[in-house]
Image (cartoon, coloured by chain):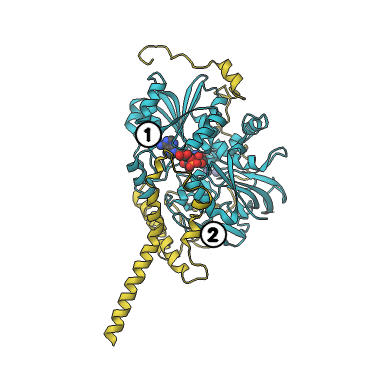
Amino acid sequence: MPYTAQKPPAKESSEQLRARIPGWGADLDPADRPSVPKEQFDPNLSGAHWDFPERQPEERPRERSIEHEFLTPVFGTSCPTHGVSGAIRRFSYAKYSEGRAAHWLLLLAADRVDALGSTLRSFATLRPDNPITQTGIRTEFTHHGLQSRRGQKRVDLVHQPLDVIVVAGPWVAAGLGAYAAYRKLSRAGRRRR
Amino acid sequence: MRAMVYRGPYRIRVEEKDRPAIEHPNDAIVRVTRAAICGSDLHLYHGMMPDTRVGHTFGHEFVGVVDEIGPSVQNLSVGDRVMVPFNIYCGSCYFCARGLYSNCHNVNPNATAVGGIYGYSHTCGGYDGGQAEYVRVPFADIGPSPIPAWMDDDDAVLLTDALATGYFGAQLGDIAEGDTVVVFGAGPVGLFAAKSAWLMGAGRVIVIDHLEYRLEKAREFAQAETRNFAEYDDIVVEMKKTTDHLGADVAIDAVGAEADGNLLQHVTAAKLKLQGGSPIALNWAIDSVRKGGTVSVMGAYGPMFSAVKFGDALNKGLTLRMNQCPVKRQWPRLFEHVRNGYLKPSDLVTHRIPLEHIADGYHIFSAKLDGCIKPLIVPAA
Ligand SMILES: NC(=O)c1ccc[n+]([C@@H]2O[C@H](COP(=O)([O-])OP(=O)(O)OC[C@H]3O[C@@H](n4cnc5c(N)ncnc54)[C@H](O)[C@@H]3O)[C@@H](O)[C@H]2O)c1
Ligand SMILES: [Zn+2]
Ligand SMILES: [Zn+2]
């Protein structure tokens, strides 16, 4: 009871727990745990044989946080920025620190532009995006979609239908875009006739 | 080579990509033999993490065989079986020199607030990940370790993130003998945290989720008590009732950004991306723990703000502890625990999915179908 000084009695004693749970108390001493203390100064511990790492060549301009003094000596080279999404990303990095919501919201916006643009471009390739195979939705039938949900108290079932909207969004947008373009073209065609 | 690539929220496919090359003298190229899908990958998959680019290959939990090494690599040889921590880190910066391997300053140009992580968006450095046949491993002399001869690949792959993180989460709880520990989330991280809490001398371990099959695993694998929060009007009140109204000594958030249980929080965060993450489990942790207690946060949140009940944390005098797990720091001790049989990580593996069918794996894990707890990805060759 918190209303008086003593800790409530334990449900099980340490002896009972040790007998019931293999390894109980193996790390009992709080001082003898791998991440204690949090900071342990030892520059040789990790095995680094350099004071500052050699620099990875910057083959193309690499965007970076303005909170960094310089480009880090090592960096990832996956998916360089390109197109409209790339322009938004580079602007966001050049202008806003990580402390600014604008930085992250612009990056999220660029992600949506990137996804939409990539989907549209994929229709001009031999491998157009396929929402059926890419979402793995077939596993609803092969891996007990119904059974995994029926009769459960799962609270995520309320919002799972929203996922469909998130996924279908680019297709709906692409469809509307195509329809608008078609209307414009056919109207222009009619005017010319 | 074959690699998983992101195509947009909820959409991935397997593509032919260039095999990664040595880009820095201390790089290695590793041929992946096993990878896993982590709860963190779901945040990327659902489009929550800023600067997740189309074409990016995910995967930060993997083991494999060294296929090529850069000219300055001393500690690894071609052909070594290696396990690779999910953190990319230099070993020599201010933070690495103090053991904060997950907070390295030399590997992530895109952000200073987070270190480098394989296959975890450009916000974490823009490195392709291990859900592929091959992966570039920077600082090959620092992160990777040979897999002990006695250790199974399935156990080793879980040591590169999920087990290390759960164990680290229990440590950040500063558990003292006899403490009551409540763990929110019965995913791999939460289950490992619950199991680890016993090693640190917990007197009572309670796991909370809304997925009955995972709670069953918590009872059986982690010998914990469980509560299904969907069965309670208010789980915080239940936590008070079950602790003589004191509250738990320690609470661990092993849920993170996509927590359920409050539709407004979930939808504003996970669907509308107006918050860095939905802090439902974190808020429950803050409210369930006793005054003066500790909340350990392992659940991941995005870089934007989240609606956290900070006032309660202040008024209760809580200690909030959190980080990405510095994986390799946990290994020597965890190797002992695995060897002694105290921890058997591969017990949580429920699915084995060929790389070619990884889109199925993501959906099964994300929608929590078929009793899925931990899916492994197996490249063909
Ligand atoms: N800090 C780190 O180093 C680190 C490392 C790995 C994973 N993580 C994070 O840990 C979290 C869990 O990872 P995982 O692989 O176990 O994921 P997971 O998705 O398998 O598990 C999350 C569990 O939380 C449950 N849940 C949802 N809302 C809840 C609530 N309000 N209360 C209690 N439970 C709730 C879900 O039903 C699910 O079982 C993720 O956010 C992941 O990003 C952090
Ligand atoms: Zn992870
Ligand atoms: Zn470093």
- Number of labels in the image equals 2
Of the residues tagged 2 and 1, which is closer to the observer?
A: 1
Chain coloured cyan here? B
* Chain ID of residue with mark 1: B
* Residue farthest to the bottom, as pictured: A193
Judge whether B340 appears above or below A162 on screen. Answer: above
Q: Secondary structure at mark 1?
A: helix
Judge whether B159 appears above or below A105 on screen. Answer: above
Chain coloured yellow here? A
Residue B330: x, y in percent?
A: 59, 34
Mark 2 on the same chain as mark 1: no
Find residue A58 and name its label. Answer: 2
Judge by depth and name the residue closer to the eye, A65 or B343.
B343
The residue that label 1 is drawn on is B283
* Quarter in which the C terminus of chain A is drawn: bottom left
Residue in view at x 51 percent, y 20 percent:
B203
Disc 1 packing (10 Å; few <14; some 14–19; many ≥20): some
Residue A133: x, y in percent?
A: 51, 59
The quadrant in which residue B346 appears is: top right
Residue in view at x 41 percent, y 45 percent:
B303
Establish whether ligand 1 lies closer than 8 Å to the Cβ of label 1.
Answer: no
Residue in view at x 59 percent, y 54 percent:
B355
* Residue farthest to the left, as pictured: A191
Residue A88: x, y in percent?
A: 39, 60
